[in-house]
Image (tube, grey):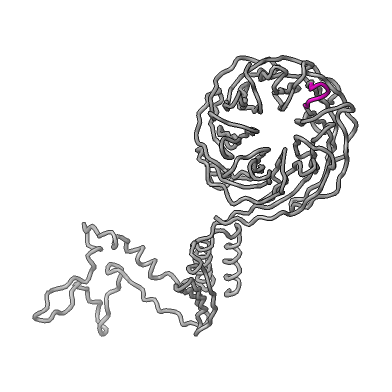
Amino acid sequence: MTVISSILDSFEFSTSLSRRMSIIKTGNVYAIFYGFGPVVKTFSIGTDGIIGAEIDSETLDAVFGTDPSPVNVVGNIYAAAYEGVGADGWLSTISIDDNGNMGSVIASFEFDAAGSTNNSRIIPVSGNIYAIIYHDSNSDGNIRTVNISDDGTSISLVDTYIYNSGVVRGGNILHISGTTYALAYREGGVGYVTTITIENNGTIGAILNTEEFSPSMDYDLEFMLIYNDLYSLIYTEINATISTITISDAGVLTLVDKDTYASTAGRHQSFDIVGREGENTRIVISYADAVNNGNGYATTLLISDDGIIGTSESPLTLDTFFEWSSIVHLDGNISAVVYEAADGDGWIKTFSLSVYTIYPADAQTRVTSIIHRYDRGIYNMEIGLGEVVADFGFPNTATIAKKSYAKFVPPEKRKPSITGGGAPKPSTGKRKQRASEPEREVVPPYFKSGYTPPAQLSMTARAIEAEQNRPPPSRVEQVTKAATSYAGFLEKLIPFTPTGVFSKIKDTITGLFK
């Protein structure tokens, strides 16, 4: 594999401490929730990675707030769960239209007044019901469900549940299917995934299953659906690590694979799906090197549909200081990442990670020349492949004499020969024989009654007659067939060329010789 990577654009959106942040798509633009406030800012980002100017800015809490987790309520209404004054748990709603213009805060609600509501995450459950996961003042793993009206004006608590009474950090929550949800978190230094039920009305049920995915993890944890019932977690043990796990609709957990995506400890990581490649899903990961001065990087890898993790590609350096990243895939090979840089400033950068397969790996065996020649009615295309040369001929049938096709007539359809003026002489089916020559049959053996022909002679007389009477292929047919063969040759030779190029090559060649 070869990776062609580059930074496309960058923009400093904050000159104050930015802390944990999230970037989400809102209508035609992107919104960044971050920092002490928390603050929301909107920007346009083109599919080519070009970042537009800041559109609007709004603060969710006039007193204090940090570490926001946003969710779309309905339409242009958004909510964010965050840690407010005294580390209490707060939830605020705001409107963001499709063009990035924001209104003032609609409503605020304190969902936990006990303090230390760190690292909260919020997801939709059903209708107006939302679930918030966080660790509380006792470091317990806590889930609370709330009701948020469609217009964001009304927020109320529905249910609460402690899913783990240990020292919990880094909680994440995902919807699996129906009323089944999965929680990923760290208790002490051990990583777990737990499945639990949450009814559509917000009532939190019992724990279904728990599975340990890491015996010794540290730092941050991210959890995401990959494909069908396959999920992935990124975290750090000794090095930056990724695991895959299947989760059934009933909450049954099965660990699949585990590997490192960087040869150093990773922090402040985030990942997103780039797209499908055959029976694989490509993801992009941003992370900080927790050992070497906190440099920020982005890499990409494939995860097969059965959960096998591929090798990560050579990383792209994003910055020399990198914390609290949040990444979002934009289009094609282009992604955007927001993070806190040196001095706590907030930055957004767009970048491209293009992965190509170059075959053959030895440069001396790749295409080195293409020569076009015209010789007596034949268009020749000679392709040099190192020391190997492939030659493709495209006949110009307008300048080449056509072959003469003799017509085969089966014996039973032949007319008797006429000799002189007398009556037709019936055929005996025999010719005159030399004295030393054995008698030969005029009728081929595969026309004899009861004869079973070998496979290579199994055509019927009618099929043979039709084949021999078939006119020669037209010049268009000849050229199209040759052009298709040539394009197929190039496609196998250079498989990393973008989709559609070889069909264009075929069409171009065909057009030249019509």
Query: Which residue is rendered at x = 81% and y = 37% of the image?
Result: 17
> Magenta residues, as a range?
81-87
Q: Quadrant of the rendered structure where residue 78 is?
A: top right
x 28%, y 67%: residue:
412
Q: Nearer the viewer, residue 497 or 473?
A: 497
Q: How many marks?
A: 0
x, y percent for residue 236 = 59, 36
Image height check: is 285 above or below 158?
A: below
Comparing 258 with 359, the one in front is 258
Q: Is residue 222 rendered to the left or right of residue 81?
A: left
In the displayed structure image, the side of residue 312 where residue 92 appears, left or right = right
Can you say whether 275 is above or below 201 in the image?
below
Q: Residue at x 62, y 50 (%)?
A: 315
| Residue 42 placement: quadrant | top right
* Residue 13 on image: x %, y %: 83, 44
Q: Quadrant of the N terminus?
A: bottom right
Residue 203, by quadrant, is top right
- Front-most of 299 and 118? 118
Q: Is residue 45 above or below residue 376?
A: above
Name the residue at 39% across, 67% down: 467
Front residue of 376 and 434: 376
Magenta segment includes 234: no
**Which percent across, then down, holds residue 220?**
65, 33
Can residue 82 be found in the magenta stretch?
yes
* Quadrant in which the C terminus is drawn: bottom right
